[in-house]
Image (tube, rainbow, N blue to C red):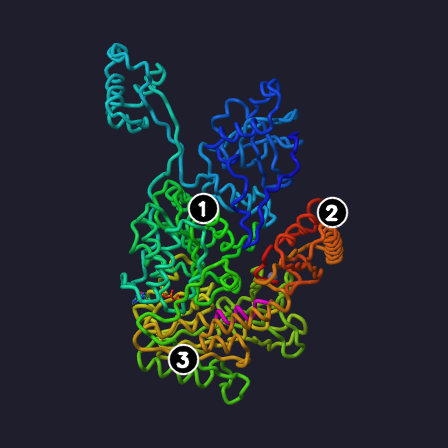
Amino acid sequence: MPSALPPEEPEISGSLSAPGFLESPSSASDGSDNEGATQKQLFDTDPPPWEIAAEEDVAVAKVVLSDAPYGPYDYRIPDPMRGLLRPGMRVHVPLARRKRPTLGWCIETSIGNSSGRALSEIAEVLDDEPLCDPPLVRLVMWMSHYYQSPAGQVFDALIPSSVRANAGTRERTYLTPAPATEDESVVDRLPPKQQKALRLLIASGRPMTAAQLMVHAECTAAPISALRKKGLVQEESRREMTAGMPTRWQSGDGETAQSHPPTADQAEALRRIMAALDSQQAKTLLLHGVTGSGKTEVYIRAIEHVVRFGRAAIVLVPEISLTPQTRGRFERRFDSVAVLHSQMTPAERHYQWQRIRRGEVQVVVGPRSAVFAPLPRLGLIILDEEHDGSFKQDTQPRYHARKVAFARAQSLQIPLVLGSATPSLESWYATRSGLAELISMPHRVGQRPMPHVQLVDLRLKEERTRGGAISRQLHLAVNETLREKGQVILLLNRRGFATTIQCPSCGHVVACPDCEMPLTHHRDGGKAVCHYCDYTIATPPWCPECRFDGIRYGGLGTQKLEIEVKARFPNARVARMDSDTMRRPGSHQKVLSAFRSGEVDLLLGTQMIAKGLDFPNVLLVGVINADSALHFPDFRAGERTFQLVTQVAGRTGRGDRGGRVIVQTFSPEHMAIQAASRHDYEQFAEAELANRQKFNYPPLGSVARIILRGTAENVTEAIAESMLSRLEAARERLGAEVRILGPAPPPIPKLRGKYRFHLLLQSLDPIQLGATIRKATETFKIPDKDDVQYVVDIDPMDML
Ligand SMILES: Nc1ncnc2c1ncn2[C@@H]1O[C@H](COP(=O)(O)OP(=O)(O)OP(=O)(O)O)[C@@H](O)[C@H]1O
Ligand SMILES: [Zn+2]
């Protein structure tokens, strides 16, 4: 059994303000620096010389695991492995009474002191090369600490499974001439076929596989295996990619624009980003540029600057922005771009990862996990649409790519650029408190005005049309736009046909048996689907409760809207974009190309169509119901609504023909909708900050959430209560100023058949908040028979 050190927590703080990341365990974890570290250690502790003799030769590796107990643990490195094992490699280690060796990750190696403990030995080293370099190992340890996630699991998130599994590779054996062949006479004495093959191999000066050699020497396998047996050729096996990767996506969507001379706003933004690059400091810059201000051009030019110095950049974008348009813009301007996306095969992913790690890539463009791209000479990280919710991962480790990017940039002393037309309040607040520098681009390119936004008050009867979702004014505007050969975007942030399936006779709502959430009716296939867990049944023709035959579909989804639109505008060519119609790889590109070429007049969809798209002929944007997210039980509801309306409004007026926006809403006086209608980010941000201040909500304070789920409701609640007592005790012991709310059932009280309770913790100090949870959960064990699990979510993005 390995003797455990007291679980060692690196002294790293997670707060945006704390420079702690820089001071994380440094030289000792750097394989290349080991000699220096050892000398220093020996010197510092100054042990009597006879002890040095006894102990100096113990090589120790610190190892972390993915499943409990998580480590880190010290293991002795057996002599034959000493030159091989480096931090960032996987190992097999014995653990407690487990029969099979356990997989772990080495985070540190050192020579020295076993302090008289008998250490278990590393059983096997699994990698030839580290899967991450020392700065990434430090990033893992910081994430593990800050997000309270086992380090082994963080490694698993950092290194794609396709890389761990060597997807798309095979082992190949290469032949080289053995030293014995230097003696000419040995070669001369061989039979002719063997001689020919061997001479060819010697002459070629490079290793060959047996198959290659057979072709060149025009022989069978027999002479080669004879050479092998005589020990005249040596074998060496290597793992290789099976082949180059086919590109399954066509590049671009037909957009052809090249680089433009920068506008005054762009030039100023660039000047400031370049100054940050040249200062070689870890500066965070918030690029607040209105929709259509040309942020992408700024990113590209900044990256050109980085590439000129032989360095590389990461551009993080929301998955839905990984459109052919984004891809095309980067691929046209750089020789070697790696675009990472969720529809890659494991082999493609592995192939790209290897290219990136070999330093063959100038720019990596991808969703949140691309923040871990192992570029050897990273010079800049950019987050586009930095406010987007998809940057937060909703499974362990529940990291936010913005925070991780910040930590990585800090440790490498490189700039981080956050760009958005609607920055998150976190980033906005960082510019106010001096942690980030604000760069504003308040104008659109080409002196185009911001589009005019008109609010339609749905509470007024005369605005509504009978039985429809489209108001009279929006109807007229669509017709007018189509007549002028302009294009239209309609946003409805809800997929499916109807939201609820309700019996008008008894009021019964058809719900998911596992989540108790109303099912959504999907017209194709007549299915009723739970949007939380995908539970699907045939839509019942009569009420399952009272058998009344006349069940009604209430609410509205994109499918139903599509039908209404087609009926109202029979001559318009309509396309729908939501996660139901966009399941297949390439479907995005198809629809967007059709829209760009003018084969589609009207594009309707969910938030998928709200961001980033740049189509000059869109003259009208309609928002069907701006309040759909406004009354959610979440302190970010106002922020989300503001972002969504502002972003979708920004899809028009991007050409020379102008554009206008019609926003239908039941709450036209709401601050978020008012501010969005005036494109007034600052007004919104200041008012919202004042709101958050009242309750110390982020960004003024920090929030964490603990979610417990279990099969029995009362047991789950009881465990949640005991979690509460532990948290209270921890708070007391630490003297921490932390507010604890709950336990209470969250807005989704049941999910996938499990009952849920949550606790919310708030504090002005993220370090106290983290420490309280760590202390409370350190020794918290839930008996297996209770079947309750819990997760800790630091900086949660939703409260559902
Ligand atoms: N200096 C320039 N002169 C003329 N056109 C430009 C210039 N810079 C960028 N553009 C064009 O302006 C359009 C808008 O640029 P881009 O899509 O980068 O905007 P954005 O700031 O990212 O907006 P959004 O936040 O709405 O996505 C693009 O078609 C781009 O080619
Ligand atoms: Zn469900």
Mark 3 element type: strand
Label 3 or label 1, whichever comes before in sequence order: 1
Instruction: Please tell me in which quadrant of the rendered image residue 633 appears.
Output: bottom right
Magenta segment, prevailing SS (helix, strand or loop): helix
Q: In this image, 59 relative to 603: left or right? A: right
Q: Nearer the viewer, residue 29 or 476?
A: 29
Q: Which quarter of the rendered picture does the N terminus lie within?
A: top right
Q: Nearer the viewer, residue 274 or 606?
A: 274
Is the residue 137 above or below the residue 409 in the image? above
Mark 3: which amino acid?
His
Is the residue 41 above or below the residue 778 in the image? above
Disc 3 marks which residue?
A: 452
As measured in the structure, the alpha-carbon distance from the residue carrying label 2 to the one carrying label 1 is: 47 Å
**Residue 246 shows in the view:** yes
Label 2 or label 1, whichever comes before in sequence order: 1
In the rendered image, residue 774, in percent from the top left (x then y), is placed at 66, 48
In the rendered image, residue 766, in percent from the top left (x then y), is placed at 61, 55
Mark 2 element type: helix
Q: Nearer the viewer, residue 22 or 637?
A: 22
Mark 1: which amino acid?
Leu
The magenta stretch is 635-644
Is the residue 604 above or below the residue 463 in the image? above
Q: Which quarter of the rendered picture does the C terminus lie within?
A: bottom right
Task: Determine the quadrant in which ligand 2 lies.
Answer: bottom right
Instruction: For marks 3 and 1, give the one nearer the viewer.
Output: 1
In the rendered image, residue 390, in percent from the top left (x then y), is placed at 50, 59
Disc 2 marks which residue?
A: 785
